[in-house]
Amino acid sequence: MKKTAYLIALILGLQFTLSANAQDVETISLRVPGFAKPLVENLANEYSKSHTGVEFRFVSAKSQDAGNILILTVDEQAVNFARYAVLPVAVKGSEAEKLTASHRLNARKLRSLFFVAEDEDFEEQSKAEQKIHIYTGNSQQSASRVYATYLKEEVNAYKGKKISGDDSYLIAAISRDPLGVTVNYLSNIFDIESRQPGSDLTILPLDLDKHGRQVLDAANLDNIISLLEEQEYAEIPVGTVGFSYDHTNRTVNDFVSWVLTNGTSELHHYGLLSLPQNELSAQIQRIVSRELAQN
């Protein structure tokens, strides 16, 4: 009888402890576009090692979760911690690659290739423009959207087919179409282990300076990142990636602060560019100022 009572007390005590621990754990919901998900998964895992009271869960773009929600976005109003780059690609050896191989695409030619002009005359289009099939994404965080904005075009002015869902589907679409061309983030274009384009992709020839052309032709992810951190090109969109969240939420705020101070060393590995140090420092100061104002 005593043994039974002891076991019951032990079980009740264990349940109480587990319940108390569960109440101490806070969950941060992460809404992250596919091109940055591997990076954020790594950041969440590293943060959890030293912050055992926080758990992370990834939610879809359609999620109605209104709790501790942290959204990774390319919105300029976000707290930025990295940069992305977008490049136009086709499948190596495809008809699309052959049709563009002799071109050096500057910003004007890229607009002509991807977008419908209001006064466009079909007869004046090049052979490549007439034959190539353009594939674009329609999500808010799609590379297609930022590419259009960068080239000062409307998203609905894209030629070709729109693909719903994550931008990785654009790669799948052109892999099935010999005439397919799309634009995408570096992290979707490159295999992060080999540092070479995945899915037999090739970067369309852009009208860059000699060094820039050599780097793109060699198609090594690390060298392309270094090039774009050092130099700007009118043909290559580079923009910021950041966190959008409730800044009064201390749990989320602590995680974002940790990312800015401890989590930027792996950006290159996952296909993103670093922020210039002065910009990163400004983002850190931005959070510090908000915390002081709240206190």
Image (cartoon, grey):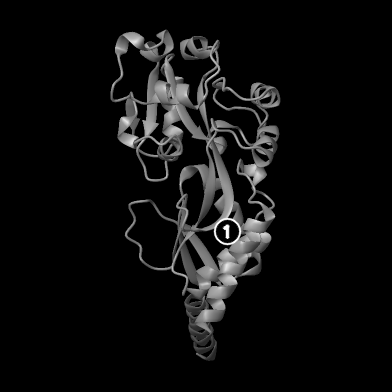
Q: Residue at x 70, y 33 (%)?
A: 223
Q: Is residue 265 above or below residue 182?
A: below
Image-based side of 126 in relation to 97, left or right: left
Position of residue 91 measured from the top left corner of the image (x, y, whole percent)? 51, 19
Position of residue 25 measured from the top left corner of the image (x, y, whole percent)? 51, 73
Q: Residue furthest bottom?
A: 2
Kind of residue at badge 1: Ala
In this view, the residue in front, 37 or 224, is 224
Is residue 48 in view from this perspective?
Answer: no
Q: Is residue 226 above or below residue 108?
A: below
Q: Residue furthest front?
A: 119
Q: Residue at x 48, y 58 (%)?
A: 78
Q: How many marks?
A: 1
Residue designated by label 1: 44
Q: Quadrant of residue 182?
A: top left
Q: Residue at x 31, y 19 (%)?
A: 120
Position of residue 125 measured from the top left corner of the image (x, y, whole percent)? 37, 12
In this view, the residue in front, 103 or 25, is 103
Position of residue 202 measured from the top left corner of the image (x, y, whole percent)? 56, 21
Is residue 39 in view from this perspective?
Answer: yes
Q: Tell me the element at label 1.
A: helix
Q: Quadrant of residue 29?
A: bottom left
In this view, the residue in front, 30 or 104, is 104
Q: Label 1: how many residues lie within 10 Å, few (<14), some (14-19) or many (20+)?
A: many
